[in-house]
Amino acid sequence: MKRTDYFLLTSPFVAVIAVIALLYPEILTNSIIKMTVFFYTTFDWFVVWLPLLAIVSGLYFAFSKYGKIRLGGDKAEPEYSLYSWMAMLFTAGIGVGIVFYGPIEGLWHYFQSPIGVNSGLSSAEAMENAMALSIWVWGVPAWALYMTGGLVVAYFAYQHNMDFSPSAAIEKAYGKKKWSKTVSRLIVIVAIISIALSVSSSIAMATTQISSGLNIITGKTFTGIFSKVVILIIIFLIYTGAAILPIKKGMKILGDWTMYISIGLLIFVFLTGPTHYFVSVMINTVGRIITQTIPFSFEMYLFRDRNWFTWYPMSYWVWWITWTPFVGVFLAKISKGRTIKQFILASVFVPAGFMIVWFSVFSGYSLVDTIEGTGVLAKIANTGAYEGTIYNLLNLMPLSEITKPVTVFLFISFVVTTVTSAAISLGIMTSHDGKSESRTKAVVWSVFMALIGFAVVVTGKIEGIKAVGSFAGFPFVYIFLLWIAAFIKQIRKDSENKIKEGE
Amino acid sequence: MYLGKTIIENISETVLITMTVIYIIWCVKLAL
């Protein structure tokens, strides 16, 4: 049977967005922001408890009889040793986002949240709340959402020989239903468009960070639109080249080094900064998360700042769900031979553990500087120039002449590795059979993503980055429930069949 | 904050919310 031509179904839509991005960047970004605000303010009551659903269902499957099921069959051997598997999970969340948001997140909640310093709380209480909120959005709930997507993909891929596709669960579990084919196609279309758009927002994020870094390092202005566009074009040329040239091995080495350098940066700030304080922040925040998980999951902050609630936690939950096809497939691909219990517990708690350390150090440092230090970082955050925060944080540390250029390099390599792999994946997803690589299509996607990234850069709003990153993935909020339904149905059916076979 | 919307806005909100609730119930039914 001929496969649906997904390139034809998705590229015109993204092309139209890309053309509008080029001609009317501000109109495009502002319209996307408006639509996003509409979604978040209309469906917040639905989105708010989804992470808790992922946590609770995950714990149920881990500790029920289903937890013993081995992905790939009873005799499947793990492809990676326990140590390499854990290491891969540990670094799974390292990306442009955590370096960008690491130092800002805490400050943002400290000043803007309804339980921050401006709501009349003492600075100590507001600080503890800010850390709890930061680690709440980046920690266990985020990874429970990724894990759920990954578990569904892994189960159908390993137990039922389906593709590592976001629509595989529906095709298998509900293949006989009339709506199955249409819904499966829609899921693939949404996945393609949302990957293109969310990666565009990563391009924009990295461009603003690189320009700000060059500005701070050289003292010359690199933050104007012209400089940013030049940086974006250079990034575009590098990642497009990487996507079409036979340098996969080189990209793998670059990806590995990006991870080592990120961890090096974390260790550096941890050791040269107030180490005892960082450890105290971690312990304190973990405690708050344990006691606050249920209240946070139902907190609608009624009659308080709706703007803050829209951009946090709503935009984060939708953002994570948007990335689920990407991150979930990665988690699934490395976990053959693991039991469902191992998969669930490790892919939630190991990367979430890394996030707790990362945010306790970077956001923790911004907050201690605000409360008893120079106050420089808070000043920057309050002017809205978030992209400079990481460099100014490093300025307060020794050896900043070395760490700042290294951070600029980090952003370049993050964006190049992420966008290259996204362009290649999009090329594969939209190829004639959904399996072969298509260089031409990868280049077409590269161009689209750069143009949409351009619109966000020109508008220069942090809301633009978040809105473009998550807006196309909003349907995934609905698909997410369908995934869980398909998984429950299939695993129960398989288990009943196994009992019957045993009899 | 919550008041002052037009009747059309209130009705479209109700429709969207009702459809989502029906969808959630449908998913539960599909799972079981």
Image (spheres, coloured by chain):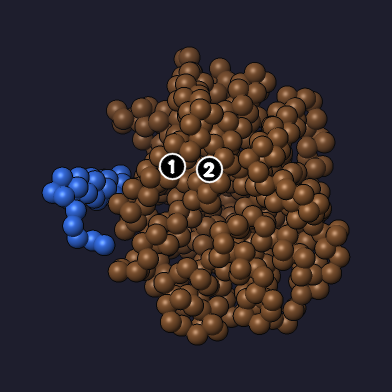
Chain colours: A brown, B blue
Q: Mark 1 near mark 2, Cβ–Cβ under 8 Å?
A: yes
Mark 2 lies on a secondary structure that is helix
Q: Earlier in the sequence, mark 1 or mark 2?
A: 1
| Residue under label 1 | A30
Tell me the subunit letter for badge 1: A
Callout 2 crowding tier (Cα within 10 Å): few <14, some 14–19, many ≥20:
some
- Percent of width and height locating residue A269: 77, 68
Tell me if residue A307 comes above or below residue A174 in the rendering. below
Image quadrant of residue A497? top left
Mark 1 lies on a secondary structure that is helix
Tell me if residue A424 comes above or below residue A142 in the rendering. above
- Percent of width and height locating residue A290: 50, 75
Asked if residue A358 lies left or right of residue A458, the reply is right
Q: What residue do we see at 42% from left, 45% from top?
A: A33
Q: What residue do we see at 53% from left, 51% from top?
A: A462
- Percent of width and height locating residue A177: 31, 31
Q: Amino acid at mark 2?
A: Thr
Tell me the subunit letter for badge 2: A
Q: Nearer the viewer, residue A238 or A228?
A: A228
Q: Nearer the viewer, residue A392 or A175?
A: A392
Q: Amino acid at mark 1?
A: Asn
Asked if residue A265 lies left or right of residue A29, the reply is right
Q: Can the viewer see residue A438?
A: no
| Residue under label 2 | A459
Q: What residue do we see at 65% from left, 78% from top?
A: A368
Say if labels 1 and 2 share a chain.
Answer: yes
Q: CA distance from mark 1 to mark 2?
A: 8 Å
Asked if residue A8 lies left or right of residue A248, the reply is left
Asked if residue A57 lies left or right of residue A249, the reply is left
